[in-house]
Amino acid sequence: MKFFQIQYKPILINFFCILFFFVSGVFKVNAQNLKTKVDTIFKDSVPYKILYDNKIYKLNAGFATLDGGFYTSNHIYYWMKGLAINFNFHLYKELYFQVGLTRIKGYKTLEYPEKKDLTISYFNFNLSPITIKTENTHFAFVFTPIGLAYGGGYKDETYHFVGKIATDSTNVIQNNYFGLNYYSALQCIYKFKYDLGIGASVYAEYQSDATILGFKLCLYFSAAFKGNQTKPNWYYKNNPDKN
């Protein structure tokens, strides 16, 4: 029995969109409540920096995430381990450009209905021209609606046969694959510092004959930190380019 069918792609995409707008609304409400704790520095009437926790942070700074966890698929039937790293470069307001790498490996011994070993090795280059991040001082929410996943790997199926005179023989079937697929991703992050955080992520990759799902923990690193606040707030408001 398959876990997921390829025709469920629209349902997954709709789920990602609904969850994004819901969490985005929650974060914006929370941001309004935190206004008294944050002093915003404007440059040419555009929000440029914030003063928070006696530190100076740049708004809409680039960031990176490191994810590790488990993946499954409708043509593999077991959990695999995986690691991903993504770099996000600011484009405009809450929009970012994302590039990253995904590595998935797995091994499992099956006894029924056939005695065999499964080995998976998979490497991917991810690229998305549009990634959306909304954040406040304590939370960040990162949503990639659709991106390109380019790479490949192999799946080994090693079958074991036991003869009547206790003789062993092995038959190995290897499926190699390489090509262009599509992916979506969600990351919900709690920031214990404005530029550092930890959270959870969901990854979905849409191949021609399968769907891969990943459930992972993620670390968040932002380039927002500009320096410690050493002068009164009015100084930075009058000199937005000064740290």
Image (cartoon, rainbow, N blue to C red):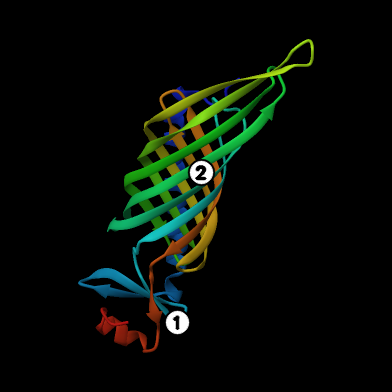
Q: Can I make out residue 3 in this image?
A: no
Residue 140 coordinates in the image, percent (x, y)? 46, 58
- Given the image, on which type of amino acid does mark 2 rest? Val
The residue under the point 68% across, 29% down is: 109
- Given the image, on which type of amino acid does mark 1 rest? Asn
Q: CA distance from mark 1 to mark 2?
A: 34 Å
* Secondary structure type for disc 1: loop
Q: Viewer-proximal residue, 123 or 187?
A: 123
- Farthest left residue in view: 44
The residue under the point 41% across, 24% down is: 208
Quadrant (top left, top right, bottom left, bottom right) of the C terminus: bottom left
Q: Can I make out residue 105 in this image?
A: yes
From the image, tell me which residue sits under label 2.
202
* Secondary structure type for disc 2: strand
Residue 111 coordinates in the image, percent (x, y)? 72, 23
Residue 225 higher or lower than 88, as above or below? below
Residue 83 higher or lower than 76, as above or below? below
Asked whether, in this view, residue 19 is left or right of residue 127, the answer is right
Q: Viewer-proximal residue, 218 or 113?
A: 113
The residue under the point 38% across, 38% down is: 149
Q: Nearer the viewer, mark 1 or mark 2?
A: 2
From the image, tell me which residue sits under label 1.
54
Q: Viewer-proximal residue, 164 or 83?
A: 164
Q: Residues within 10 Å of mark 2 (few under 14, many from 20)?
A: many
- Farthest top residue in view: 164
Labels 1 & 2 near each other (Cβ < 8 A): no
Q: Quadrant of residue 61?
A: bottom left
Q: Quadrant of residue 147?
A: top left
Query: Tag on residue 137?
Result: none
